[in-house]
Image: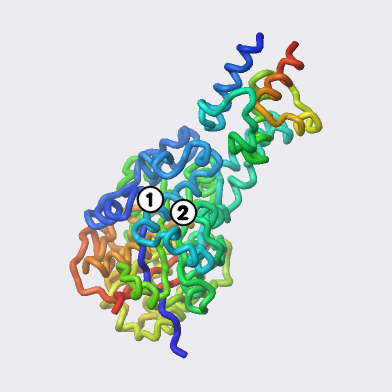
Amino acid sequence: MERRRVVVTGLGAITPVGNDVESTWESLLAGRSGIGPITQFDASNTKTKIAGEVKDFDPDVYFEKRESRRLDRYVQLFIGAADQAMVDSGIDLDTEPELRERMGSIAGAGMGGLHSFEESLDTLRSRGPGRLNPLTIPKLIANMSAGMAAIRWEFFGPTNCTVTACAASANAIGDAAEVIRRGAADVMMAGGAEATVSEFVIGSFNSAKALSTNNEDPEGASRPFDLNRDGFVLSEGGAVLMLEERERALARGATIHGEILGYGMSTDGFHVTLPRPGGKGQALAITAALRDAELDPSEVQHLNAHGTSTPANDKTETAAIKLAFGSSAQSLAISSTKSMTGHLLGGAGAVEALACLLAIRDQVVPPTINLHTPDPECDLDYVPNEAREMDVTTTLSNSFGFGGHNVSLILGKHQ
Amino acid sequence: MDRLDIETRMKALLVGELGLEADKINNDARFEEDLEVDSLGVVELLMALEDEFGVEIPDDEAESILTVGSAVDAVIAKTG
């Protein structure tokens, strides 16, 4: 029996560079950074004072007040993006109630409701356990994005949440595609969001020496593959893709944004934060995705890199791309959109998969900005500083998480 | 504090803190059935009342507070 194919019929995004899909994409093509001084807390005590915050997000656009106050910001951002994707898909569960049992969601979050967690800790320390809000746990648990999606749209199919740190929403998309492939659902809301711009998280990442401290030049702070990179920039937001079984999408005349062609996973088995030197672990994920898609490396034109702007990631990822692609690595156009968005942690993989689909739609790939002084160990074509019009039918998106989780997704033009 | 004062402050709390609709709030309104406050919401509401009025409402007493009016009564009984 031929494998069920999975296409994308809805897109939604809320990111530091735009509060919907088109404004996000426009910023990415224009090379516009979403990084600025932190406004969500007083950053005078943290080493890093910059982040990629979502600007002017208004929960009232998506929720009644009594509803939004019960949700952590990370769930609000996920549901906001999911709402956009639902509208874009044209799926209406009221006219098609039988779909409710064939629709599900897999959502990624690296950490969950950290804002709510910190507020609750303040209450615990100052007033004792008896004054903790009854909504504390439902607000902070990392699975509430998919749970809330099902509650909001009343669907009853498979839901799950991936928590593989910075690979979480890439895992969510890959896992959701597999749910459709094996026939357990026909439509899956897949993606993820994160909202952890807080003193606790910035302070902790600072201690781990993971963040850029380039506070004087926020827009230049995320500089993947540049010799002068000094760490990633923490961001928030996310994206959601509506995945749909291809025959169903064709039958209802849906607009098809692209196809999920391949999904590969591997693990470094090496260190809690550092990638395995040499890139072997990451290369295995890329190779697994190519095998899943039944593609030769030479058939992929574009790659959206994990490209975090940390010294270790970018050189290791470059080595991994060379290992997996062989001589085809030289002809790949590689973009790190994190140079503009910063690192959305559990939301990053979904935003980057979305950028791959839009690159296919518009036949243009986004740039890697702030790439002015090439690192000799990063010697591939990173589409420096300017978007590039080119033929793109097949793209690969990398996402790697603390713990050594490696995920590659292959997205293709639907044909 | 007289009854009207407590009612006014309670209404402000229900609207401002819990996001309930002002025109649905009256003494007979039942939290779960009329105001659509679920069990977690009722706990939240009672904790907010404790903070607002500086009173303590024990769990066994809380179980019998089902309407806005009974919550007002409970506060009056404790604040004299």
> Is A116 on the left or on the right of A214, as rendered?
right
Q: Residue at x 48, y 57 (%)?
A: A346
Q: Residue at x 40, y 58 (%)?
A: A86
The answer to which quarter of the image holds residue A2 is: bottom left
Kindly report the distance in space between the C-alpha atoms of the residues bearing marks 2 and 1.
Answer: 9 Å
Establish if B62 lies above or below A3. Answer: above
Judged from this view, the residue extending furthest toward the right is B60
Q: Position of residue A368 (x, y in %)?
A: 28, 60
Observer-nearest of A292 and A203:
A292
Judged from this view, the residue extending furthest toward the left is A389
> Is A274 on the left or on the right of A303, as rendered?
right
Kind of residue sitting beneath label 2:
Ala
Mark 1 crowd level (few <14, some 14–19, many ≥20, 10 Å Cα) = many
Kind of residue sitting beneath label 1:
Ile
Chain under disc 1: A
Residue corresponding to mark 2: A193
